[in-house]
Amino acid sequence: MPQTASPGPTVWSGAVSFGLVTIPVRVVSATQDRSVHLRQIHTEDGGRVRYRKVCELEDREVHLAEIGRAFETADGSLIPVTDQDLHDLPLPTARAIEIVTFLPTGAVDPIRLGGGGYYLVADGAVAAKPYTLLREALARSTKVAVAKFAWHGRERLGLLRVRGDAIVLHALYWDDEIRVPTPEMAPAAAAVAPEEIDGALGLITAMTREDLEGADLRDTYREAMQQVIEAKQQDRPAPEAPSAASSGPVLDLMTALSQSVNRAREARGKAGDAAVHDLPARREMSAPKDRVVSKREAARRA
């Protein structure tokens, strides 16, 4: 189940620019990191291994307040860039999420999604009406907005959509950030029979669900890590790893698909679901036209 929590800290504040309409917003993360984080240690004595920031010229550790940023040129020279320089960039999107166009909901290739999403929170009473206006217009149009914004030292392309009562922003990759698939990424052409495609479609039907809810869609890696850590804390043996599935005989595609459909039915309790169809019967190879038919076979056919 999705986690319900407080909005969380603001990662950016500014405004959404929608034509001549301005919507003051705060941006909060729509996701949270639930990973089990491990620290690096010295295996000899268990001491923590830490990274320290050291000035190369003075050969001493420097504090965060002493650290700035710079651009390194081709010859290795460093040009300092201050926070004020970044704040004063001659860029409209430095202080606004500027909507530039709208697209049908399915027109954006998922490969362009560049990381987690962000909720746009209406910032103050003055933002309530224009925020609601944009949200309702997006919902009725069944379109998504494409915007430009500048955070963390770069300008990004973004997608705005409606989720519940909130507007969500997803960062998108630029065209030149996406690699084009090359021919060697795909296998050599292989002949696939029509009944094998039908079988794959039957398996897709058997495995289809309405949403991403379910006990099988959970982070089992995190659960296993927590079990190991708890066992170490309590000085007891670690839980045994499940035995690997034994590899059976190599099956042809149609047999593998048929067995997969049966397993999907059993796992989801849908043996009697009319929406799950049996795989088509495997076609027998027809005899060559010039085949000699025996007298006994001819008599049987007659």
Image (cartoon, rainbow, N blue to C red):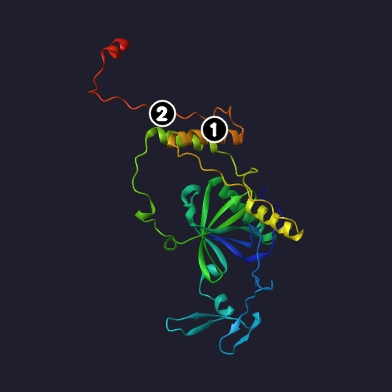
User: In the visual, does 160 lie left or right of 1?
Assistant: left
Amino acid type, callout 1: Asn
Mark 1 and mark 2 lie on one chain; the one further toward the N terminus is 1
Q: Position of residue 276 (x, y in %)?
A: 53, 31
Residue at 26% in and 12% down = 295
Label 2: how many Cα within 10 Å (few below 14, some 14–19, many 20+): few
User: Which residue corresponds to mark 2?
Assistant: 282
Residue at 61% in and 80% down = 53
Nearest to the observer: residue 86 or residue 291: 291
Task: Check the picture and name the quadrant holding the C terminus.
Answer: top left
Q: Position of residue 108 (x, y in %)?
A: 47, 52
| Name of the residue lying farthest toward the right | 234
Nearest to the observer: residue 286 or residue 201: 286
Q: Position of residue 186 (x, y in %)?
A: 38, 51
Amino acid type, callout 2: Arg
Give SS at disc 2.
loop
Q: Are marks 1 and 2 in contact (CB under 8 Å)?
A: no
Total marks drawn?
2
User: In the visual, does 91 lie left or right of 230?
Assistant: left
User: Which residue corresponds to mark 1?
Assistant: 262
